[in-house]
Structure formats: C-alpha cells, structure tokens
Amino acid sequence: MAQPVTIALDAMGGDLGAEMVLPGAGIALERRPDIRYLIFGEEPVVRPILARFPKVAAASTFIHCDVTVRMEDKPSQALRSGRRVSSMWRAIEAVKKREADVAVSAGNTGALMAMSKFCLRTLAGIERPAIAGLWPTMRGESVVLDIGATIGADAQQLIDFAMMGGAMARALLDIERPTVGLLNIGVEEVKGLDEIKTAGRLLKEAGLTSLDYIGFVEGDDIGKGTADVIVTEGFTGNIALKTAEGTARQISSYLRAAMGRSLSARIGYLFARGAFRQLREKLDPRRSNGGVFLGLDGIVIKSHGGTDGEGFANAVEVGYSMVRNGLLAKIAQDLAVYHRAGFVAAAAEPSADAESSMTGVK
Amino acid sequence: MAQPVTIALDAMGGDLGAEMVLPGAGIALERRPDIRYLIFGEEPVVRPILARFPKVAAASTFIHCDVTVRMEDKPSQALRSGRRVSSMWRAIEAVKKREADVAVSAGNTGALMAMSKFCLRTLAGIERPAIAGLWPTMRGESVVLDIGATIGADAQQLIDFAMMGGAMARALLDIERPTVGLLNIGVEEVKGLDEIKTAGRLLKEAGLTSLDYIGFVEGDDIGKGTADVIVTEGFTGNIALKTAEGTARQISSYLRAAMGRSLSARIGYLFARGAFRQLREKLDPRRSNGGVFLGLDGIVIKSHGGTDGEGFANAVEVGYSMVRNGLLAKIAQDLAVYHRAGFVAAAAEPSADAESSMTGVK
C-alpha cells in the first residue's frame, strides 16, 4: 500500500468548530483509511471531543495552539494575532514543513488565504492564487475558478488560472486534456472585457498541449458543463456561485410547496420519494464542499464554515484526492512547459479591437 | 376608459421575426384590449402573416420599412445601415415622436440599445442607460439591473441605477418605497470593489425618500428576494442572470431524469402532475421575458430573440404596465428630488478604506 496521506486540520474553524471538524474527520477516515491527521486546536476544547472519536484519535497527532482565528476577523487582524500561534496558521505551516500533504480549514476565508499566501508563498511564475471549486453540471463536474480569492484579474492571471484549473481537472476528474472556457457575456469574439479578450486570443495562439481552449462561454454554460474548466476573476466567480446556490434553493422551495398543495400531489410524492431523495442528494451543497487554493507551494482546502460533518468530510476527501493524484506536480509541469515556450501575455501586443462597450457605442 | 396604450412593434426582430411577433401581439391584445399597435416591417413578409391575425390587424397601423437589422449585425453596422430606415429604428422613432408610448423588439440587443440611445437620448442627469429585468424570487419578483447594457459602472452610475430601478419597482410591483441592495461578494462593509463601496456609502448618507437602501447583498440574495431592487453593473448582472437560467434548466433536467427512473416514480409523477405543471409554469422563462431600457427619454422593451408568441406577449405586457403606471414620470420625479439636493457622488470624498482585495493582502 502507498504512503498514508497526512492531512493537517484546523479543528477550530467553522461555525461549530471542533464539534463539526472531528465528526467530519471520522467520516472521511471511514472512507479513506489511509489518512493520518495532524489536528491543531485549543486543547481544552478539542481533547474532550476527540475522546468521543477513538478511531480519529488513533489516526491523529494532536497539537495544542493558544490562538483561534475568529470568523469575523479581518485578514490583517488574523495575521497580526494568529501568525505562528493559531490553529489555522499551524495547519498551513505543517504543509510548508512537509509534515502534512494538505491543510483543511472551515475558518474565515480571507484569513486562510492571507495566511496561506504568507506562509506557503505562490509558485514561481504565478502572481496570484485562486480558489477553485467543483461545480456539479448536467454532464458531471467542472472546475470553476476564481470563486473568491481576489477581485479582478489581468490577462496573464486569467491564463494562469486556465492552466492551474486544467491541472486540477486532470488530477481530480481524470480528463487527459480538459476543455477550458473563459466566462464572458457573449460568445462573439468582439464582446467582453479587454483582459478577457486578450487572454482568449493568447490562449488560442498558444495551442497548449495540457488543455483545450474552447473560447468564451456564458453563465448558462457552467451548468450545462460546456467546458471542464471555467475561468473568471474572483468577483464574478463568487457572484455566479452564490447565484446558482440561491437558484437551487429557490427551486427546491417551489418544488416542496407544489408537492404539499394537494392530496394527489402528496400521494404522488409518496410514490416518488425515492426519486426525490436522489434529487436532494444531487442538489446537496455538501457534495461540492471544498474550495481548492491553487497557485501556492502547497495544497490548502477551504471548507464552508456552515457545513456539517458530512460536508467537511467531502472537503477532506477533495484534499486527499489532490494529493493522491499529484496536483502540485501537474501544475508545476504545465507551468514549466509554458514558461519554456517563453509565452508571456504581458509582452504581447494589445488587441486591435478596442471596442469595450457591449453596445459598441461610447 | 383611459386612452389606449400605443405600442410600436419591430415585427422583424427575433429568431422567427413576424411569425413570432404577430401571434405574440395577438395574445397580448387578448389580455389588454386597450392596446393599439404600430407595426414596422417589410411588407412582403409581414402582410401575409398579419392577414392571419385579423384582430391584431384591426388594432394596428402597418408601416413598411425597407431594412431589417440582422441578429448578427454589430451595433455600429446596424446604426450605419439601419438608421432612419429599419423597422427597429422606426419603432423607436415612433416613441420619440410621441406617436407610440413604448417600443418592443426581439431583435439584436446591442443594435437596439445603440439605436435607442442615438434616437431617444438619455434623460438629463443620467449618463448611461441600463437594462432592467424582472427576476422571480421566493418572495415574488425583484428588479435586477444592469443585466447587460454596458460593462462596468462607477459609483454615480450605480446610484443612478438604484434610483431608476426603484422607480421601476414602484411602477411595476406597486411598492411604496422599494428596498434596494448593491450586489457584492460579502455583506461586510470592507469587502468589494471601490465603486460599490462608494455607492453604498453615498446611498446610505443620502437617505432618499423614494427608496430604502439596505446595503450589500450577495448572489444568493437575488433568489431569496432580500431586496426589491438589486443593483450591479452589466457584466456581473448578465453573468448572474445566465447562471441562474442555466441552474434552473439543470435542476429541471435532474428532476425529469429522477421521475423517469423507476416505476413508482412514474406512478408518483402521474399523481403529482398538477404540481409539476405549477412548477413548470413557475420556472417558465417566458414569464419574465422583457428587459426594460431605463435612463432614456422614452420606453423601449427588449424581448428575448428566441422566445415564442407567449413570451413576446409578456414583453409587450411589461411595456404596457410601464406606460400605465407612469414609469417615466416616476423616474423624472426621483431624479429631480435627487438633483435638487445637490447630491452628486463625483463631488464626494473617496472612501478612506482602500482595501480592495478580498483577502486584504496585496
């Protein structure tokens, strides 16, 4: 059997902290017995809960930390008070020291990203990390990034996202040469922001072997699964993700209301309850829990703060798969090929077409 | 009885042109018998179809136009070849000449906006028009703008959108003082783009009587109906709209698949088919067809190009309601109050908080 995968857990993150993290660690361990945990947190809080999960305890090393980053801390504040001493920092640091293969936290996203950047640094050739999510689609799953690391991205950063997302799709979805689309407001080449147009032109010209650039895609292409990887900057990606989550909840509530409105609908519901259970599972947001920080010299996974043990276990499993499938090596390989080709967007000529308004009238 | 509402129709717009527009006009006339139409289009195409709809013909004046703007024309191209002579232009021009109260077209969005700006001009004090849509929510309907007129918006433009969207909500949703939210990536005040933060601060300080500014909202708040009016710039608005449409289609397809998978699910479907019909109606995109161009000295409604007669009829009805409820007067009134107060964002101090990255780390 291969080496176990060592996962550093921030036991204090999330709305419920260790009461959610440790049960989640137990569920993931059940599914992946070759996981070992390094658990970071406040001893008086974590020890009694850990005692209730003997299997997790047996597969873990516990490390006490004095400080907990709070969900409402600003990133700068978290760095000031939590650097070197908080459970969040120490989990990330375990990855840096190669004591763990991946860190998982359900804590404050801004703080986790700030600490990850500070501790792990970005990969050579990458200016800015991104958060990538797995998005359920009509054809399976797609990688969508950036879903909220940073607002805005220039052409070079979008190209970096395309390459890193492609590597993640190869690692996680087992696709040889993933298709990649740039999220835009129209598929015609004249539309959209200049940086997206430039990134599109350069990706087309580059003819990368690691990914298959298919052009611009629109918002409804995400759910269709038109591309294995959807690339956008963090503001738009976050709005798209939350809008889709909101729409799914909205439709579920319509469906519940419709099924309770008449006697025959309620009878129908009883006959079809297996089908409804399948649908609920399909729409369960816990199934796609686990945002992957890409572009850092180490793997960090962000779990939703409000999830439960089942959701947290999924985030742990995403981390596990990233390690087992060699995500970092795949990214490094793609970047090396790309940089050897001397292919850098910044040096390229700007597009001749300067039409930036959607209507073409200034 | 009040004066009839005169609606100028571009009979050539949309994927099916007059074959979709005229049946749609018939459905709308059935529901609103006090509509009169001015129908613009190519005589050899439109006349034979109009002959099949005698009620529409009886309520209409037909005006032949030599030129048709094509769906694939660029806005600049459409303006060059279609100005003064196309059915699209002439429908808009009828609004300018006060021969019609509103124009409705299912043609090319970019061309329609370009021609509308050129012909009708923006209202005094408004720099840039927006396209507003009615978005079905868990609590009813909300106005969302800009869903695709222009990429980007500064603080002043976002404030203009807030006021115009508020006026539309008062006109269409019959709400005295609509709640307004600015679409952002987090509800905390430190987050988001500078222009959104500035617009938020100024809207809060302004204490407008025509609307109730409730702060930042996130993508999932749109479907929840957290605010009556959701304000964003055209790129994000368009991505959010299309993403929601894609998610709705995706869930419908999951549901269909689940209901066909087993015998008992199929039996359940038979019992609950009334409920499923209600759900389908609720999710029918034709129900929310009709984007309203706001900020122009006249009302123009954009119908989806791919809709059918039923959907087009809804766009016509949106235009009808805008006229009957005095949208333009409401917008003019709000703008006058606002400008009398000498409240202009451009003159305001920039926010002291310059943290533009979501993680706070540059």
Image: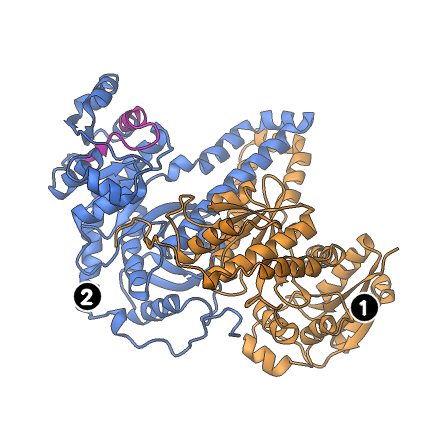
Chain colours: A orange, B blue
In this rendering, is residue A88 above or below B334? below
**Residue at 20% from the left image edge and 31% from the top image edge:** B67
Q: Is residue A287 left or right of residue A125?
A: right
The residue where tag 1 is placed is A50
Crowd rating for badge 1 (residues with CA inside 10 Å; few <14, some 14–19, many 20+): many
**Residue at 73% from the left image edge and 67% from the top image edge:** A9
Crowd rating for badge 2 (residues with CA inside 10 Å; few <14, some 14–19, many 20+): few
Q: Are marks 2 and 1 in contact (CB under 8 Å)?
A: no
**Residue B38 in view (yes/no):** yes
Q: Is residue B109 left or right of residue B56?
A: right
Mark linked to residue B276: none
Q: Secondary structure at mark 2?
A: helix
Tell me where residue A327 sits by quadrant.
bottom right
Question: What range is drawn magenta here?
Answer: B7-25
Mark-to-mark CA distance, 2 and 1: 63 Å
> Which one is nearer the viewer's eye here, A56 or A329?
A329
> Which one is nearer the viewer's eye here, B281 or A3?
A3
The residue where tag 2 is placed is B339
Q: Is residue A115 left or right of residue A156?
A: right
> Which one is nearer the viewer's eye here, B167 or B202?
B202
- Which quarter shows the N terminus of chain A? bottom right
Q: Is residue B180 left or right of residue B117?
A: right
The image shows residue B250 at horizontal and vertical percentages of 55, 39
Tell me where residue B96 sits by quadrant.
top left
The answer to whether residue A208 is magenta is: no
Disc 2 and disc 1 on one polypeptide chain: no
The image shows residue A68 at horizontal and vertical percentages of 66, 77
Q: Tag 1: residue type?
A: Leu
The answer to whether residue B10 is magenta is: yes
